Amino acid sequence: MNHDIADPSLAEAGALRIEWAEGRMPVLASIRERFEKESPLQGLRIAACLHVTSETANLMTTLRAGGAEAMLCASNPLSTQDDVAAALVADGIAVFAVRGEDNDSYYSHLREVLDADPQITMDDGADLVTMVLKERPDQRLVGSTEETTTGVIRLRAMEADGVIRFPVIAVNDSATKHLFDNRHGTGQSAMDGIIRSTNLLIAGKTVVVVGFGDCGAGVAARADGLGAKVVVVEVDAVRALSAAMEGYTVATADEAARIGDIFITLTGNLRVLRGEHFELMKDGVVLANAGHFDVELDLGYLADHSVGKRRIRHELDEWTMKDGRRIHVVAEGRLVNLGAAEGHPAEVMDMSFANQALAAEWLAKDGADLENKVLRLPDSIDQEVAAIALEAIGGGLEQLTPEQEEYLSSWEFGT
């Protein structure tokens, strides 16, 4: 279903949000300016399965500036900002997404963008690629791009099984994506979603962060900065040691369940907090998930072992257990930063979406010569994106002298 909204005020509100984000995305703006002159995507159809936000809207207009016919569906049922979708439709970009859509609608929208026979897809969780590989053996792509850690994990599994039949660019693996989007973006926006949905004071609370990758490290840092006592649950010894050396308590899930006030999962795995943990939790705890899929919290257990559920605040459900304890779940266990807030700040998404636009350009230019596997963007693109972003925030970049360059290229160090 195309997002055909008759109320012009909704589209106008979305356009203002898009304009606000655009003013904070200088890297993407510089790419858009070049795309308008060079049209590197001329004649291509690009189908994107991304969160429908004001930042994504600026990516879509950048792709169009490069000559592409761009269309968009949501990568999460709760991440669509309806006013932004309406503004894009009013601007001539097809959008297949409505906030709160059910699973049937969600997957039908994926099929609708694929029915347009795109040459390039953009994914946030690898849903489009998965659908092409499973359901559409005759559909041919120049290539695809992937935005998330979860999506890259899925794609690596596909690569290991030998089923990928086109190149896929792991945009997530670019330093200017995962080092900033995952850590700073998720760190701020996940805590933002929890605060908006609960209005809790974070200071003095025990915040349990389950998973200490880049996203988990970002959330832990923001919770710590707000005055929380941070506990980290991790299965990887190196990451657990890293968390301990950051000053956080490292514990098992059972130990953390007994003391936590707020729990945030960021693992990409399923049922990392489940029945045996829920039964140990205190009355009034808050559970949130910042992983891509809504499988990290075992909500089925809550449904089977509670005596009631009610919506108590915006995107906050209260489950009453048989012993009277109350367990609160934010955004139905879906992405807390988009389900209960607005997602990552524009300054962070500027770099991520700059990488997406440049990945599309790379596929358009060289896709036929690339291997059918998961690939990284060249490091030179990371350097270009970072330099523009640094300049935008007022930083200066030192330059090596010719003498220093010669020295570093020599094996005769110290002479």
Image: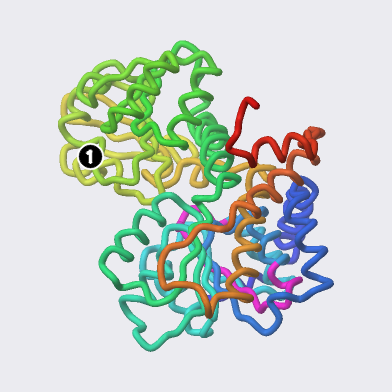
Nearer to the camera, 343 or 375: 375
In the figure, is residue 179 to the left or right of 210? right
Nearer to the camera, 116 or 387: 387
Q: Quadrant of the C terminus?
A: top right
Residue 314, position as x, y percentages in the image: 49, 39
Q: Which residue lies under the disc numbered 1?
A: 302
Q: Disc 1 marks which amino acid? A: Leu
Where residue 248 sits, quadrant-wise, is top left
What residue do we see at 64% from left, 43% from top? 348
| Colouring convention used in this rendered image of the protein | rainbow
Where residue 393 sits, quadrant-wise, is top right
Residue 354, position as x, y percentages in the image: 67, 56
Task: Reply above or below: 96 against 326.
Answer: below
Where residue 209 sits, quadrant-wise, is top left
* Neighbour tally class for label 1: few under 14, some 14-19, many 20 plus, Cα within 10 Å: some
What residue do we see at 67% from left, 54% from top? 54
Task: Reply above or below: 200 against 122.
Answer: above
In the figure, is residue 164 to the left or right of 92? left
Count all numbered tags in the image, as a single digit.
Answer: 1
Residue 125, position as x, y percentages in the image: 42, 58
Element carrying mark 1: helix
What residue do we see at 68% from left, 76% from top? 41
Nearer to the camera, 119 or 328: 119
Nearer to the camera, 253 or 245: 245
What residue do we see at 82% from left, 33% from top? 394
In the figure, is residue 334 to the left or right of 92? left
Residue 30, position as x, y percentages in the image: 80, 57
Which stretch did the figure color magenta? 63-80
Indicate yes or no whether the magenta region holds residue 64.
Answer: yes
Indicate yes or no whether the magenta region holds residue 78.
Answer: yes
Q: In the current view of this chain or complex, which residue is farthest to the top?
A: 204
